[in-house]
Amino acid sequence: MNKKDIANRFKGDIVVWIAILILCVYSALAVYSGIAGRAAKVESPAEYSYLLRHVFIMVVGLVLMWGIHLIKWHNVLQKLSLTLLIVSWALLLVTILFGKEVAGAKRWIDIGIFLVQTSDIAKVALIIYLSTAFANIKEYENDFKQMLKRVYIPVLITCALIVKDDNSTAMMLFATVVLMMFFARISIKKIFTLIGIFVLGSLLLLAVFSFTGNKNENRVHTAQGRITRWWSGEKEPDSQEFRATLAVAEGGITGKGPGKSDKRYKLPNIESDYIFSLIVEEYGLLLGAIPIVGLFLILTFRGIKIALNSSRKFSAYLVLGITFLYVLQAFINIGVSVDLLPVTGQPMPFVSKGGSMFIMCCIAFGLVLSESRVNDEEKIAQELAEIKEDKAYIEGSEITQEEEE
């Protein structure tokens, strides 16, 4: 297979492709190390089945991303945006009522192969819906009732359905919405109006939730405790926050080497929530921290470039929303590991172990790569049209000159 064949099969922004594939390599290495550490701790070789499941999910996700990037989606997604949002609300409600409860939180629906975290679906559905709404924002921007109906209420309903069992995801999603509104050039007054409604609504909901259920299992109390501990700066030597920052510190410049992490035996869910700590401990600053941060910065800049090159407002907002959402999630994961943020439980996109999270990342960036491919094809078509026009002009000039002679 020559380079031309490869280019025909993998279209779109090649830099985005390379960045995602490198992140997947880090994922396979780090997840294997984390699972091996847990298997040794509990003396159960069966733990390795989780690695095979993760590799299978990675392959399925990447194949999906490849297939999606070959299709021009923007017209279909615009027509289905409201339907997708309503379906995501239904899934969130099902999760609240019948979802699998883990550590006092109902975030997942068990489909057998893996647990589906329905908020992962809702995040992308809301971004698709808002991209459609912002593409036509000039038609109703000055009509408060229409803004309330088309923008404020959909955002608030989605966040309200998520916030009880996943506070950090609701806040992260809302921050992404605010960034999208800013880039859509919606007035600062309207943005702050939404922020005010969100803050008041969140305080009201959290106040209600804090007085319901078992205090030891209530996620609101859990979040309050995490924020209080982080703000006070006091950490117990056996706390996960302390062990995570210690792992980063012990990694140093070059790290301890692959598979030589000590903290993987002591940190819960290290292959998910604290995977950055594991990577830095084993690969250090040079081969771990800097490349990971750099790759997500590359995804940020390339996403913005793809959006700016798009001739369609909907596609531009969609690419920006997806890029902001997942890069923000990555830096939240990093911030928790280095103690810049309180514990949130946010996995790192393309790196952390997870079923629905990884699949939705691949689907979302499949849409980004699809837009990049369409941009390239439009640019080539425009260049060919200009060449054809220039050629016709030259031929016409030659004919005129011959007639004059």
Image (spheres, rainbow, N blue to C red):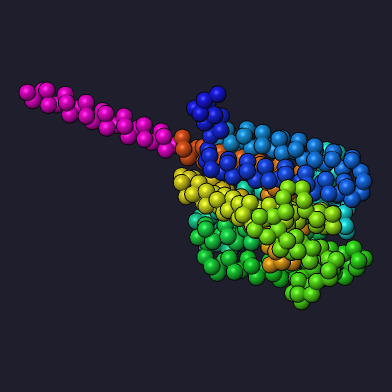
Quarter the N terminus occupies:
top right
Q: Most extreme residue toward the bottom, as rendered?
A: 232
Q: Is residue 89 above or below residue 221?
A: above
Q: Identify which residue is drawn at 55% across, 69% down.
A: 189
Q: Specify the segment rendered in magenta.
A: 378-405
Q: Is residue 288 visible?
A: yes
Predominant secondary structure in magenta?
helix
| 98 on left or right of 8 | right
Q: Is residue 221 above or below residue 232?
A: above
Q: Is residue 94 above or below residue 221?
A: above
On the image, the x and y values in percent for residue 266 come to 85, 57
Q: Most extreme residue toward the left, as rendered?
A: 405
Callout count: 0
Quarter the C terminus occupies:
top left
| 296 on left or right of 305 | right
Q: Is residue 98 visible?
A: no
The quarter of the picture where residue 205 lies is bottom right
Q: Residue 401 magenta-drawn?
A: yes
On the image, the x and y values in percent for residue 397 come to 17, 29
Q: Identify which residue is drawn at 63% across, 41% down.
A: 21
Q: Residue 404 magenta-drawn?
A: yes
Q: Identify which residue is drawn at 52% across, 52% down.
A: 301
On the image, the x and y values in percent for residue 113 come to 83, 38
